[in-house]
Image: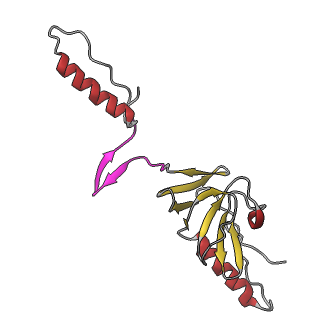
Amino acid sequence: MTEMTSRFALPLLQPGQAQKELHHNEALTLLDLAVHATVKSAGINAPPANALIGDCWVVGTDPEGAWSGHAREIAGWTGGGWRFVSPPDGMVAWCVADALWVQYNGGTWVRGQIAANSLWINGMQVVGARRPAIAQSGGGATVDAEARSTISAIIAALQAHGLIGA
């Protein structure tokens, strides 16, 4: 029985093993699919008929044909046919069709969500943690409808972007 790595189930070489190159090449093929993964599309169930060597997809939840039994795995077309990588939690891949990152968490692939504590651009923090809601203006000795309208629009924009609570 071949021993496998814990995260990507890559075949390990064994002492005295015959034809070590087969296991080594299989491991390299799977690594090629998994490392800095890029997929054509995510969530499709049927293997495409026109796959090129190196093309990959995230298999959907109800796979068919050659992908049967490989739900939510990364399927890659190789010179030896389809190979599959079972993603560990936290695995990220670039999805060309969506132009978004997809991340595997809790048994599902999530599109376009990036978790962070803050966003920095050119060494400057531009977005931080969400702040509490800002009370709408009201009352006061002098009513300035234009100023209130502008402040309300700013607050609405900040809420729409999720930067402050509603």
Instruction: Check the picture and name the quadrant holding the C terminus.
Output: top left
Residue in view at x 74 percent, y 64 percent:
67
Q: Residue furthest left?
A: 142
**Apparent side of residue 97 relative to residue 23 in the rendered image (left or right):** left
Asked whether the viewer can see residue 10, the reply is: no
Relative to residue 124, is residue 38 depicted above or below? below
Residue in view at x 73 percent, y 79 percent:
12
**Apparent side of residue 114 relative to residue 4 in the rendered image (left or right):** left
- Give residue 40's position: percent from left, percent from top: 56, 65
Number of numbered labels in the structure image: 0
**Apparent side of residue 22 relative to residue 74 in the rendered image (left or right):** right
126 falls in the magenta region: yes
Residue in view at x 78 percent, y 62 percent:
68
- Give residue 148's position: percent from left, percent from top: 22, 19
Tell me where the magenta segment starts and ends, as one range: 114-130
- Give residue 123's position: percent from left, percent from top: 28, 56
**Apparent side of residue 87 relative to residue 158 in the rendered image (left or right):** right
- Give residue 10's position: percent from left, percent from top: 70, 74
Q: Residue furthest front?
A: 49
Q: How is the image coloured?
A: secondary structure
